[in-house]
Image (cartoon, rainbow, N blue to C red):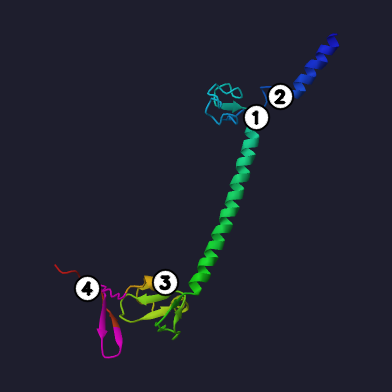
Amino acid sequence: MAAMTSDAQANCNIIVPDDEDDGEVQEITCIKCNGSQVNKKGLPCRKCGGSGVLSSKELAAVAETVRAEVRDYCLKSFQGMFKDFLEMKRIEQANTVHENFICDGCNMTPIKGIRYMCSVCSNYDICDQCEQKGVHSQHAMLKIRKPEFAPAKLICQYKNIEMNQQADTEVCFVKEDQPAPK
């Protein structure tokens, strides 16, 4: 009979893990009461003993696996949605037409896509391709994505740039830095 007892103890040790295992026991929110510590009838939860948390290696491992899977899924989904959004926005921008405006760099009429308006010259607009090539890069340009967002008029006067408007032409002069008045 002593042999049976030792076999039973051996089986129990195999089935039930020891508390001295290397794995950490983590506390997770009770799945029955969701951490509220009471059940639907207002009595203490029997699953967690009214503590609101469960201490279990297995449940902690499952919860961590689920968290990792949800995190990966959300990351991949949001990255895909963001790429789709940017592509839709790029296509929409490429199809935008700025009526009654001619590109002063390549004479595209009307300007399609993004329109750039010079902040110094009173009537100077270029298209996106000319801006990327560096046409009229000596002045700051206002980026206009949609025609309805364009200002009626924009003239900025900078400290080191002087405009000389003659009959049909505009000539920009860049002044040398002058000492500040005393």
Question: Residue at the left extreme?
Answer: 182
Q: Quadrant of residue 47?
A: top right
User: What kind of residue is marked 3?
Assistant: Lys
- Name the outermost residue toward the top: 1
SS at badge 1: helix
- Find residue 17 and name its label: 2
Check disc 3 and report its element: helix, strand or loop.
loop
Amino acid on which the number 4 mark rests in the picture: Gln
Give the magenta-colored segment's residue range: 152-171
Q: Position of residue 86 (x, y in %)?
A: 52, 64
Q: CA distance from mark 3 to mark 1?
A: 57 Å
Magenta segment's dominant SS is loop
**Quick one: which residue is furthest to the front in this view?**
41
Disc 3 residue crowd, few under 14, some 14–19, many 20+, Cα 10 Å = some
Q: CA distance from mark 2 to mark 1?
A: 10 Å
Q: Is residue 30 above or below residue 76?
A: above
Mark toward the start of the polypeptide (2 vs 1): 2
Judging depth in this view, the residue of 83 and 147 nearest the camera is 147
Q: Which residue is disc 1 drawn over?
A: 57
In the picture shown, does residue 1 fall above or below 166? above
| Residue placed under numbered mark 4 in the picture | 178
**Mark toward the viewer: 3 or 1:** 3
Magenta run includes residue 159:
yes
Q: Is residue 160 magenta?
A: yes
Residue 87 picture location, percent across and down = 55, 66
Identify residue for label 3: 146
* Residue type pointed to by label 1: Lys
